[in-house]
Image (cartoon, rainbow, N blue to C red):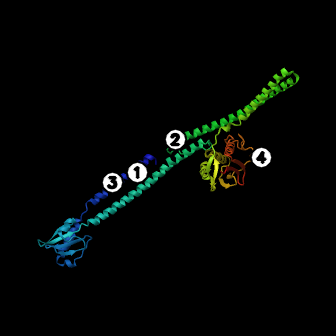
Amino acid sequence: MKGKGMVWFYLLVSMIEIICLVILFDKGSALNTDSVTVNEILWEVKNDWNSLNVHENNTNQQYSVIDNQGNVLYQSEAGISTSINEAIKRQDTILDIEIDDEIQGKLIVSNQLNQQYSRQLQNVALVVLIMIIIQSIMAIIYFIYLQRTIILPFIQMREFAQRVAYGNLDIPLTMDRKNAFGAFSEAFDIMRTEIKQARIAEAKANESKKELIAKLSHDIKTPLASIKAVAEVGAALTDDKNNTNYQQIIQKSDQIDTLVSDLFTASLEELQQLSVSVTKVSSTEIGPLLENADYQHVSQITEIPSCSINADVLRLQQVFDNIFVNSYKYASTKIDVSATLSDKYLIIAIEDYGLGVNEKELAHLKDKYVRGSGTDKIEGAGLGLYIADYLMKMMKGALVIENGKNGFLVKVYLLIH
């Protein structure tokens, strides 16, 4: 049932409840005594007028009998009216007892307003209780509806936006079209796909640029070496004046060679633009970072020892994100997370249950654009571990990768403050 349907259904139930209350009050508004029962009592009293002292009340109605002088001849129950004035105050029914065309006394029949009013209150209380229960059930159902169609999708979109902000573009945004954000989920996921494709294209362009720079540096250095060699020969065979010119050529050749080498090195130093601000951080902040990184909730996280570390919380979140994303993509298993203290470091060990990595490839897996064998069909740029390793070095820590007991193991070393 959609939101508008829930609202209309709630209004319908509320109207039915109001109608029930109106009917109930209408039935209870006329609190009076049954006339048939009163006539039966009057008839019995007349028949037993001479023996009222042994008279029996055969009805559920309470009444009393007084003579013309106000003397009480019969009272079925203590507490009911025994005088005309009292009966008038209580709105009781007062009838003349006429025998042989003479009025012998008065019959006072109790209207029992208190009992009737009490029963009416009980009925009203029962109806109100049923109304509260029905409306509570409807409120719970509507809350569950809001939880599933608005709150949870909103939380998913917020987490998705955080992942995209941190550069994690591998996990799609899977949402039901029937919820309140269904119309936007596909557009957001298309945005993620486009950004991811742009990142992959950028990585390929960077790789091509690196190869181009390497080729150009080689092509430039080869003729440059020839020029320098000719200048050195010329310097050895000429006089002092010409020798100075040759020395300048040699010097400029060395300068150009240095500039070309710097250009090649600069292509590998682009990540130096990532700023890292290291501060004192409590280890209690690591748990939430791990939980945020594990958005598929497949990890078992042990208790983090209490200490202070040197870290940049934002960059540390990136490190954990890259580690978990790699495990999701290449292992797709549960993940064990443990934490231990050494003399200088708090060590966070993250291990999956995948097939691990070829031992020969481990030494190069943290290099830029390097990926393990058998990953050609899985999207990736080979930058995750490279970035994580770089960020950990900037935080005076370390990133160690190895094949553990169960699968691929990554150890994050955080320097204790």
Tag 2: residue type? Ala
Tag 1: residue type? Tyr
The mark nearer the N terminus, 4 or 3, is 3
Assess disc 3: are there few (<14), some (14-19) or many (≥20) residues with their C-alpha within 10 Å of its C-alpha: few
| x and y, in percent, of residue 87 in the image | 20, 67
Dot 1 corresponds to which residue?
A: 10
The mark nearer the N terminus, 2 or 3, is 3
Secondary structure under tag 3 reads: helix
| x and y, in percent, of residue 376 in the image | 70, 41
Asked if disc 3 and disc 1 are in contact, CB closer than 8 Å, the reply is no
Task: Examine the rendered structure and indicate whether residue 1 appears above or below residue 31.
Answer: above
Dot 2 corresponds to which residue?
A: 183
Label 3, label 1: how far apart the Cα atoms are = 14 Å
The mark nearer the N terminus, 1 or 4, is 1
| x and y, in percent, of residue 54 in the image | 22, 79
Q: Quadrant of residue 99?
A: bottom left
Dot 4 corresponds to which residue?
A: 360
Asked if disc 2 and disc 3 are in contact, CB closer than 8 Å, the reply is no
Secondary structure under tag 2 reads: helix
Left or right placement of residue 98 versus residue 203 in this view: left
Does the rendering let one see residue 211? Answer: no
Label 2, label 1: how far apart the Cα atoms are = 27 Å
Tag 4: residue type? Lys
Secondary structure under tag 4 reads: helix
